[in-house]
Image (spheres, rainbow, N blue to C red):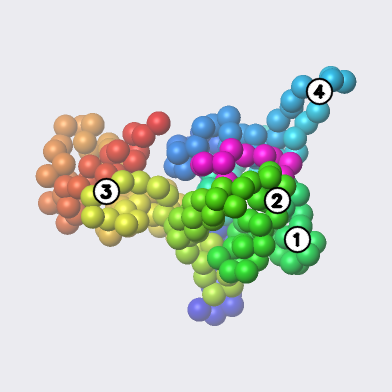
Amino acid sequence: MNKRVSMHASELRDEPAYGLAEASRYLKLPSATLRSWVVGREYPTADGTERWQPLIQAATSEPATVLSFWNLVEAHVLRALRTDHGIAIKSVRDALDFAERELNIPRLLLSAELATHAGKLFLERYGELVDLSASGQMAMKHVFEEHLERVEWDGLKLPTRLYPFATVEGARRPIVIDPSISFGRPVVSSGRISTAAIVERIDAGESAQELADDYELSVAEIEGAVVYERAA
């Protein structure tokens, strides 16, 4: 890939593309949680209120908060810390600041270095800050690695594809989000068919078997796309 094409792809992945509600649905995250990561949140103190600053810098904030593909990846990685261990916003920020200061990796949540020694140091720092036991750190590492396995990076070590969590029998990563496919909307990995288009046809009265025949997919993939789209 030449440098010009690579730069264009990088710019596409950093362009505003997803509203907060849409991004929450794709990532299967509560909207309030994603909003607090991207917009920040006020919280009560003895002296009144304080404000958590955002952990993720959205592609745009005015006139509306809109996320880029890279923002989706950042939120996906943060979700790993939240899944089983809750989210300590200050501790995450301190761990990210540590990574930037000590490891010289800005925006670590976007970096392929997460899968290497830098990611291990980040997890150790975060575990120390939230006082996780040895078993808790081991469990967190497992969840973290499961999330990282769903991200693909390019030659510049920047995210290029995200495989959100979805269940299809016999398929390891059945749904993919790729900014270069279907305007960055979720598609069935094996056929690059929009999950939204599948749901639209099902709602219009067509059967899963009919769509499977049309798209040369399995019935399980069709049903998995519907479950993914309709999951709360």
The quarter in which the C terminus is drawn is: top left
Position of 5 compared to 36: left or right?
Answer: left
Which badge, 4 or 3, is on the more N-terminal residue? 4
Instruction: Tell me where residue 104 appears, x and y as whole percent.
Output: 75, 67
Disc 2 on helix, strand or loop? helix
- Inspect the magenta stretch and tell me whether residue 93 lies in it: no
The answer to whether 155 is drawn above or below residue 110 in the figure is below
Q: Residue furthest bottom?
A: 2
Seen from the viewer's position, the closer of residues 213 and 154 is 154
Which residue range is magenta in the image? 81-91
Badge 3: few (under 14), some or many (20 or more) residues near its Cα, within 10 Å?
some
Label 2 to label 3: alpha-carbon separation: 37 Å
Which badge, 1 or 3, is on the more N-terminal residue? 1
**Residue 45 badge:** 4
Seen from the viewer's position, the closer of residues 28 and 185 is 28
Tell me which residue sits at (69%, 40%) in the image.
89
* Residue 7 visible in the current orientation: no
Instruction: Tell me where residue 144 appears, x and y as whole percent.
Output: 52, 54
* Callout 4 touching callout 3 (CB < 8 Å): no
Which badge, 4 or 1, is on the more N-terminal residue? 4
Badge 4: few (under 14), some or many (20 or more) residues near its Cα, within 10 Å?
few
Instruction: Tell me where residue 1 appears, x and y as whole percent.
Output: 50, 78
State the count of labels: 4
Tell me which residue sits at (27%, 48%) in the image.
168
Q: Mark 1 — residue?
A: 100
Disc 4 on helix, strand or loop? strand
Which badge, 2 or 1, is on the more N-terminal residue? 1
Q: Mark 3 — residue?
A: 168
Quarter where residue 25 is shown: top left
Could you tell me what secondary structure mostly forms the magenta stretch?
helix
